[in-house]
Amino acid sequence: MAKNEFLPFGVAANANVLSNSDYQALPARIAGFSSGVAKSEELNSAWRQASVIASVLAQFIADKTGQDVLDNGDLVTLGENLNSAILIAGTGRLLNTQSFRVSGIYTPTPGTKKIRITMTGGGGGGGGCQAASSAETYSGAGGGAGGTIITTFQLTGATNYSVIIGAGGPGGNGAANGSDGGATTFGALVATGGGGAGKSSVSNTAGGNGGVPLTGDIRIAGGYGNDGQSGTLFLTANGGASYFGGGGRSGAGAGTGGGGVNGSAPGSGGGGAYDPAYSGLSGRGGNGAAGIVIIEELS
């Protein structure tokens, strides 16, 4: 146990000190003692007031830092230890922010007691297209966005934590559905990925579902992808928006390497590919964006 050499003075129950009201009314408390004799009880009262608060503050430093608080006149060390004690005792102060766009290992910054984590699953891929007529799949749908979790919890004392970032789902090539986005995980927390663009028939393409988280304090479902076509009705098949922003737009470009635009905001869905010219060539849907983990470290 750390030692505290700043000891209180005159704290016994029968100490020779003035009552609080008498000390408050003492003229010397304002003007100080002039030449002559000062009564012991008056001096004892002044010394006790100064020593008690000094002792309490010194004990606070010792308890929080584990360092001895020595009565040696070293103001620099005493000041540094006081500052350290205040920082250690404070809770909820933002120490640092770490983010992960790819899977890795989270190592807490020294002094971190709690973390507030925001994590999003990967976005679903947009649907592709391939059609020689309006009776075929000439407009793929948009992929759904990954779900988001925001939660705060106390660290368990472990030195490392595994972070898995959900991959974005690839867009479909030709008259094919997009693939689902992957789940983002941190311990037991799971932010589900968005669904890939689908279709109920050759000429009806449905946007992917947004991911729906099942854990965490705050659970935010990802946005749905837009439908691509309903029969012969052409629709705008943008990818679903995630917590961090909108998905990729739909795009033309069958047979030219173009097609739906990839999602860019973390966890957003890819756009669908369309070919209103009915060229019969394959168009590729945009890929969903990978998820993300943002960790705010609190004291």
Image (cartoon, grey):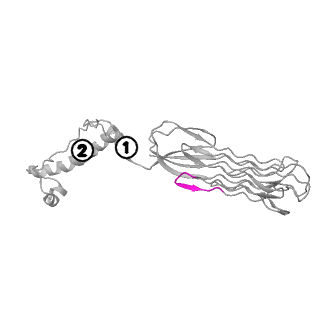
Count of labels in the image: 2
Residue depicted at 87% across the width and 47% down the height = 256
Q: Is residue 64 shown above or below 203? A: above
Image location (x, y in percent) of residue 96: 51, 44
Image location (x, y in percent) of residue 225: 72, 57
Q: Is residue 59 shown above or below 133? A: above
Residue depicted at 84% across the width and 62% down the height = 231
Image location (x, y in percent) of residue 62: 30, 40
CA separation, marks 1 and 2? 16 Å
Secondary-structure class at tag 1: helix
Where are the magenta residues, as a range?
A: 214-222
The residue where tag 1 is placed is 83
Secondary-structure class at tag 2: helix
What's the mark number on residue 295?
A: none
Name the kind of residue labelled 1 in the image: Asn
Name the kind of residue labelled 2 in the image: Ser
The answer to which of 34 and 20 lies nearer the viewer is 20
The residue where tag 2 is placed is 55
The answer to which of 107 and 183 lies nearer the viewer is 183
Residue depicted at 54% across the width and 55% down the height = 218
Q: Residues within 10 Å of mark 1 (few under 14, many from 20)?
A: few
Residue 87 position by quadrant? top left
Q: Is residue 62 left or right of residue 188?
A: left
The answer to which of 291 and 89 lies nearer the viewer is 291
